[in-house]
């Protein structure tokens, strides 16, 4: 059955969040990830984004490069933010892969909430929304005078999710930070550092953003359930730091209970050895291996045909392997280096040894497991082309689902929102367009200022 036929068959199934309307003034990834997840399950997501200024860390319009520059970046190993075919095109803000990855199943209205006309439109939208989601630094929302205390006067049943880096109060309230900064602040970068390195060598990690997306979506659904039972709207405060801290709760509790400060962990495990990533044949090819018992270690040695590992007295017991794991890791690298990672993966799995090949993004898109499950979906976006996108990460037995609409372009739904939803007259709408307050591209002054 073709994908189109399957979608026609499944179209009669209603998604659980159909009928919920959400205003979205989010940036970077954490906030947009929340609305991505809610939109995938039926909520109507309306991005509120200005054309009178470039919103930083959103569509990437503030740092557009030439095709030659993008090709040079790609050759150096950079992948984030490079447009299709390395071509920024005439509308690079619609071609950012970092933005488009989470922009499906959404709508966009051009609106600058800092301007009187934009504020009026935004408040009209809030009247008709169930939820507002934002992840800006608190002072930004305060300066725009769109805090929850203000908006609940417009819509008492509104649910507002706020996702600052560190909270709506406290000494760090207005510190700006992305997920990677938050993880440095709370110790995650140190924990994942190798024992012979330093945290600055680990590169960026955005796990806090990913966790925040899931936790934020859960929070909104829980608040909607609460409202359905009580009729009450409310503000939800979910700082990135506090939503991520429970993920490393084991290390925090070890300190509070035992007084032990966790140092760099790298790929190590507190009681398993070997436990790490080991080289295989080919350039930059690796396999992950985890050994928990003596029996698993013996099976590993048989598959690797490495009797020296078995006979070395330092490695005979789990305690010895932990004590001498630096030497063990070096010996493991020598033993795995001559193996193909895919063949070794299957051989170790057959021997009941936990192992898996380390894949890059290209190999992941060709994974036979993901292919069999139909995880990736092809989406065609006008002016961008047809590409494979990560699909929806849960499958429900009684609720078929798929990516319904491609990534949203800047201001793509202006007429629908202003005329049909908010009740603007055609004359009033056309006047906003003529003044450059509403459109599908940034104003000439903004684009000139970017050059």
Image: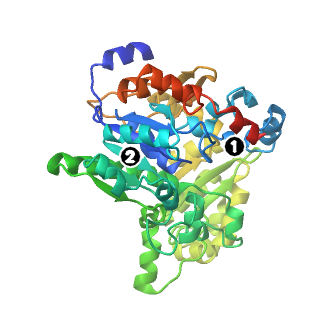
Badge 2 is on which residue? 132
User: Which of these two is toward me, 381 or 356?
Assistant: 381
Query: Is residue 59 shown left or right of residue 292?
Result: right
Res. 352 in view = no
How crowded pointer 1 is (Cα within 10 Å; few <14, some 14-19, many 20+) is rated as: some
For the residue pair 128 and 94, the one nearer the viewer reads as 128
Q: Name the residue located 47 percent from the left edge and 87 percent from the top edge.
A: 259
Taking the spot 59% from the left edge, 67% from the top edge, the residue there is 184
- Quarter of the image for residue 89 reads top right
* Residue 255 higher or lower than 14, as above or below: below
Find residue 88 and report its horizontal and vertical position in percent: 73, 30
Asked if residue 94 is positioned above or below residue 55 in the image, the reply reads above
In this figure, which residue is indicated by the disc labeled 1?
Answer: 62
Q: Is residue 443 above or below residue 53?
A: above
Q: Is residue 389 visible?
A: yes
Name the element at disc 1: helix
Report x, y in % for residue 190: 60, 71
**Residue at 59% across / 30% down in the picture?**
435
């Amino acid at each position: 059955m073709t994908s189109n036929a399957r979608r026609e068959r499944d179209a009669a199934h209603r998604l659980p969040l159909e009928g919920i309307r959400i205003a979205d003034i989010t940036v970077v990834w954490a906030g947009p990830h929340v609305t991505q997840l809610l939109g995938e399950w039926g909520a109507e997501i309306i991005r509120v984004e200005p054309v009178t200024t470039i919103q930083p860390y959103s569509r990437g319009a503030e740092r557009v490069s030439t095709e030659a520059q993008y090709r040079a970046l790609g050759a150096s190993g950079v992948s984030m933010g490079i447009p299709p075919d390395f071509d920024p095109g005439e509308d690079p803000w619609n071609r950012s892969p970092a933005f488009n990855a989470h922009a499906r199943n959404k709508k966009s209205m051009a609106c600058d909430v800092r301007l009187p006309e934009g504020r009026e439109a935004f408040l009209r939208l809030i009247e008709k929304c169930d939820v507002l989601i934002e992840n800006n630094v608190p002072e930004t929302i305060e300066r725009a005078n769109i805090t929850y205390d203000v908006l609940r006067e417009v819509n008492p049943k509104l649910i507002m999710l706020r996702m600052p880096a560190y909270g709506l109060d406290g000494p760090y309230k207005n510190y700006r930070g992305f997920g990677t900064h938050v993880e440095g602040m709370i110790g995650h970068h140190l924990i994942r550092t190798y024992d012979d390195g330093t945290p600055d060598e680990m590169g960026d990690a955005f796990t806090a953003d990913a966790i925040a997306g899931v936790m934020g979506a859960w929070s909104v659904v829980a608040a909607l359930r609460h409202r359905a039972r009580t009729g009450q709207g409310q503000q939800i405060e979910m700082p990135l730091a506090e939503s991520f801290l429970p993920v490393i709760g084991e290390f925090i509790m070890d300190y509070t209970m035992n007084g032990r400060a966790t140092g760099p962990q790298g790929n190590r495990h507190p009681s398993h050895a070997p436990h790490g990533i080991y080289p295989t044949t080919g350039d930059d090819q690796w396999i992950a291996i985890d050994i928990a018992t003596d029996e698993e270690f013996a099976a590993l040695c048989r598959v690797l045909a490495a009797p020296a590992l078995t006979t070395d007295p330092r490695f005979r017991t789990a305690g010895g392997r932990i004590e001498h794991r630096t030497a063990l890791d070096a010996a493991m690298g020598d033993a795995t280096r001559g193996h193909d990672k895919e063949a070794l993966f299957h051989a170790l799995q057959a021997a009941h040894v936990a192992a898996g090949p380390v894949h890059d993004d290209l190999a992941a898109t060709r994974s036979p497991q993901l292919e069999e499950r139909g995880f990736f979906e092809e989406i065609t976006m006008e002016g961008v082309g047809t590409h494979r996108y990560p699909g929806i990460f849960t499958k429900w037995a009684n609720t078929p689902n798929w990516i319904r609409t491609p990534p949203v372009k800047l201001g793509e739904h202006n007429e629908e929102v202003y005329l049909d939803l908010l009740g603007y007259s055609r004359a009033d709408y056309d006047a906003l367009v003529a003044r450059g307050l509403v459109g599908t591209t940034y104003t000439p002054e903004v684009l000139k200022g970017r050059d």
